[in-house]
Image: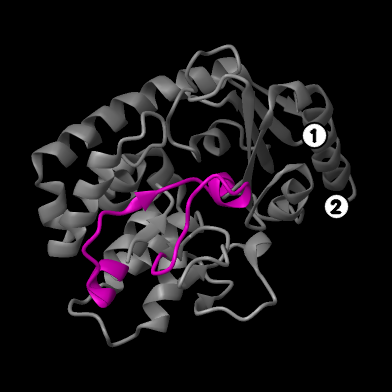
């Protein structure tokens, strides 16, 4: 039996909960949603999918993404919850060997972007927020993701923050966020009330606080971030996210991106496609965002 989940903070917490309640021994398999959607990942009997699209070959499935909802019977649980971790926590309520309520509350807060301006600007003041920012996709840092899962399985956030590797990653993240702020200012432009951050000129996409753009461009109601895929320069990745400080924007970006080989939540989503399609897809995505905003 394997846990198959995605490498973000919600996926980390999903793995913690599933390790505890199902007593799984095999290492976590970390994959991206597009790997499941496009059939690139081998899923088999006994696999537990969490925070990912459904695959009929799995034995259990837990998710909360709007675009992943299915109407066929399956084992597990799907709810429109703040996090996939919450779906697992509620499904196995009172079966855990430890009290994970604080951890799941943090996963809810972070995955639903229910953050304050102070938490966005100064994540170093908020342990869960800062630790969540150390979970980064570029580099396939599976050893660290697994280390974080093991730490969270064994102790509270104070002991996690005392770990030397976590301390190192947190300091690197603080410094990275300072650099990211300058890059956002240099490579983001406003189109009506849509902020567009284009990082395609970089060999590797700059990483940093994904909510920082909304504190720098407060007039933005939705951000579009564009970059080349770090492992395949023949692909382009587009991330969309509603402003977490201006929540009046109504476009379901997950539903919008479902028409462009992607998906996600109402307020956040992503798609990966061949770079040859960029000149077709990106203007259409921007047009849909701008047009819908202007009709608000």
Residue 81 is situated, as x and y percent measured from the top left of the image, at: 53, 71
Q: Nearer the viewer, residue 262 or 220?
A: 262
Task: Kindly identify the residue that appears in the image at 63 percent across and 46 percent down.
Answer: 38
Tell me the quarter of the picture where residue 124 sits: top left
- Of 220 and 64, which appears nearest the observer? 64
Does residue 296 belong to the magenta stretch?
A: no
Query: How many neighbours does mark 2 have within 10 angstroms: few (below 14), some (14-19), or many (20 or more)?
Result: few
Mark 1 crowd level (few <14, some 14–19, many ≥20, 10 Å Cα): some
Residue 155 visible to the viewer: no
**Where does the image place residue 107, in percent across and percent down from the top left?**
39, 61
Q: Is residue 194 above or below residue 79?
A: above
- Say which of 250 and 27 sits in front: 27
Q: Is residue 121 left or right of residue 198?
A: left
Q: Residue at x 45, y 52 (%)?
A: 116
Query: Distance from label 1 to label 2 (Cα)?
Result: 16 Å
> Is residue 227 found left or right of 147 in the rendered image?
right
Residue highlighted by disc 2: 296
* Residue at numbered disc 1: 286
Q: Quadrant of residue 184?
A: top right
Residue 131, percent from left and from top: 28, 46
Query: Left or right: 167 with respect to 62?
Result: left
Q: How many marks?
A: 2
Taking the spot 47% from the left edge, 19% from the top edge, the residue there is 204
Magenta part, dominant SS:
loop
- Residue at the limit of the structure toward the bottom, as seen here: 94
**Mark 1 vs mark 2: which is more N-terminal?**
1
Looking at the rendered structure, the secondary structure element under dot 1 is: helix
Kindly tell me whether residue 169 is visible in this rendering.
yes
Question: From what the image shows, is residue 232 above or below residue 212?
Answer: above
Label 2 sits on a secondary structure element that is loop
Residue span colored magenta? 18-47
Tag of residue 132? none
């Amino acid at each position: 039996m394997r846990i198959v989940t995605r490498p973000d903070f919600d996926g980390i917490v999903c793995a913690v909960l599933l390790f505890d309640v199902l007593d799984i021994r095999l290492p976590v398999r970390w994959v991206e949603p597009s790997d499941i959607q496009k059939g690139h990942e081998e899923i088999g009997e006994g696999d537990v999918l969490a925070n990912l699209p459904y695959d009929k070959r799995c034995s259990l499935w837990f998710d909360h993404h709007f675009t992943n909802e299915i109407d066929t019977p399956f084992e597990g649980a799907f709810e429109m919850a703040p996090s996939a971790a919450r779906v697992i926590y509620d499904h196995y309520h009172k079966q855990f060997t430890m009290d994970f309520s604080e951890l799941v509350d943090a996963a809810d807060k972070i995955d639903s972007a229910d953050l304050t301006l102070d938490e966005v600007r100064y994540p170093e003041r908020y342990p869960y927020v800062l630790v969540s920012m150390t979970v980064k996709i570029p580099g396939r840092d599976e050893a660290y993701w697994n280390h974080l899962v093991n730490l969270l399985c064994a102790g509270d956030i104070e002991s996690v923050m005392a770990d030397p590797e976590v301390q190192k990653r947190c300091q690197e993240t603080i410094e990275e966020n300072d650099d990211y702020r300058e890059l956002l200012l240099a490579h983001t432009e406003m189109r009506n009330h849509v902020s567009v951050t284009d990082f395609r000129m970089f060999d590797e996409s700059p990483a940093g606080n994904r909510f920082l753009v909304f504190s720098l461009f407060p007039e933005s109601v939705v951000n579009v971030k564009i970059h080349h895929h770090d492992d395949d320069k023949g692909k382009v990745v587009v991330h969309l996210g509603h402003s977490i400080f201006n929540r009046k924007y109504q476009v379901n970006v997950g539903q919008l991106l479902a028409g462009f080989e992607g998906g996600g939540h109402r307020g956040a989503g992503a798609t990966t496609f061949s770079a040859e399609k960029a000149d077709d897809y990106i203007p259409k995505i921007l047009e849909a965002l701008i047009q819908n905003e202007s009709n608000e």
